[in-house]
Amino acid sequence: MKRKLSYRDKLVELAYIYDVKEIKDYEKSRKNLTSGQLELILKKNKITIPKDFKSNFLRDNFIKPVGKLKSNLIEYKENKIKDKNRAIRKLENFKLDSSRKVGRAFKDIWKQLGHIGLNFLNIIPKLGKVVYEFFGDLFTDLFHGIYKQQIEPQKAKKVIIAIASIAVVATIAFSGINYFSYSDLAKKPEIKKETINKDIKKPEIKKEVKKPDIKKPQVKKEEKKNEQKPKLEVKRKNVDEVILPNLNLKTETVLNLFKDVEYDLGKVRSQKLVKPIYFTQFPRDLDALQSTKLKKETFIKIVLPLIVAENERIIADREKLIVLKDKKFTTDLEKQWIRQKLLEYKVKKGDLKKLLVRMDIIPTSIALAQAAKESGWGTSRFALEGNAIFGQWTWSGQGIAPLDRESNKNHKILKFPILRASVKAYQNNLNTHKSYTKFRQKRLALRDKNKKIKGLELTDTLNNYAQTGSEYTKILNQIIKQNRLMDFEPVRLVNSVKKIELTS
């Protein structure tokens, strides 16, 4: 009777069939190898073990099926989760697409209504001509009838009915004009009108104030004498502001906003006017833009109004200081204002001449170039997390620690609640810190010579702003020239009589 071989004996027999020397040596030396060791040696020698060798009933009939069922359940669960996520994404995309389509449909309907209204208004002149001719003929016949005394009762009734009908038509026409003119103001639903902010202080500059020096420097003496209109006061008083709160706006939303308000840098360069749209922060996905040109233009559109607004504030303060400096007697409010400005510009002993030297603009081209360099065109960690456009250092205030800071240093990058605060701090830094004395002296020399304050003439005085020194100023000049930032130096804010705020 043939002896029933165990699984191990079968593996040994298989080794002898294929002449596996390693197993033979072990068997001759009477070293007992386990089934697992025998399997490894056979597999190493590329010998396939027949399936019928394994006689483990429990493993073949219970453990393996259970394991396979378990893996199938896990795979089924993962597939269901993927299907669920895919369905959620499809639903979200459907909602977004639906909202876009509905919005686009309403916009198209609104445009069509506008075209209909315009066509209706274009008919009014022709209608007026017809009414005019009708009235002319009517009254001519009427007066002829009166003169000839041939008025009949029926004709008189027709005249009265015609006059009443014309009055009704004219009323309807004027109501339509008022309706369509009002609807034009409400075309942009995202802009909410508000009343004029009563907290804005009226500037105390009287009619005898001269124009700011930013305008054409070569002005005749006779023209200066004849200037009596306080244009600066009107500009500061009637500013149309669009303030954007912390909405975590995306770049696509920002670009659509610029398109809606027709904010174009080409127009700004030609007209020398910019709309006062004040962003409180940069869009966090600005760096995702593939076009470098579009990224730079978006950065300039965000920062330019902030710089221009702060420069105009400084101009207004400077003009007021020029008036108060020459006055023999000042009021308590004027003295308080002077003390506040002396503290703001860090001037001691009440030296108003020194205060006037420090209270002056920073050329827009320099401010834009430094903002681009220090913030990586609005994409750096400091710009996104702390609204730090100009990379100012601090040792005591709230700030963000640089990742590459040396271990023996403890400085931080100063952070701000909004972008405009960073611009104001930067301008105050250049106007007060001792490191930029040469900058202020050269700017004063340009003022004394009645010349325009140009950025390219002042960049060489900013070698103390960065550790690279003169190399830093060369980079600033390169940024200004390559991006034509000198075109924005004469730019001013657009005048308006309203103040509006953009809400989410």
Image: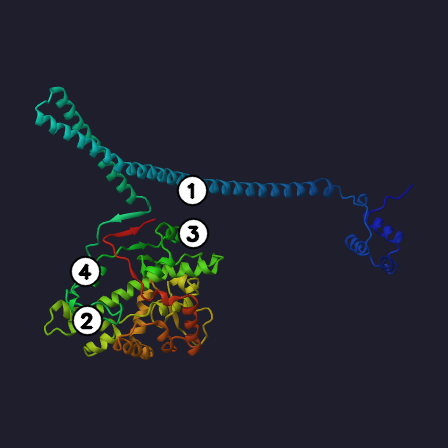
Residue 113 percent coordinates (x, y): 34, 37
**Is 63 positioned to the left or the right of 34 in the image?**
left
Instruction: Write down the quadrant of residue 294 in the picture.
Output: bottom left
- At mark 1, the secondary structure is helix
Q: Is residue 401 visible?
A: no
Q: Residue at x 11, y 20 (%)?
A: 153
Above or below for 290 versus 371: above
Identify the residue position indicated by label 2 in the image.
321
Identify the residue position indicated by label 1 in the image.
100
As measured in the structure, the alpha-carbon distance from the residue carrying label 1 to the one carrying label 3 is 14 Å
Above or below for 445 versus 84: below
Ranked by sequence position, the earlier of labels 2 and 1 is 1
**Is 350 positioned to the left or the right of 479 in the image?**
left
Residue 142 percent coordinates (x, y): 13, 28
Ranked by sequence position, the earlier of labels 2 and 4 is 4
Crowding around mark 3 (Cα neighbors within 10 Å: few <14, some 14 to 19, many 20+) is few
- Number of labels in the image equals 4
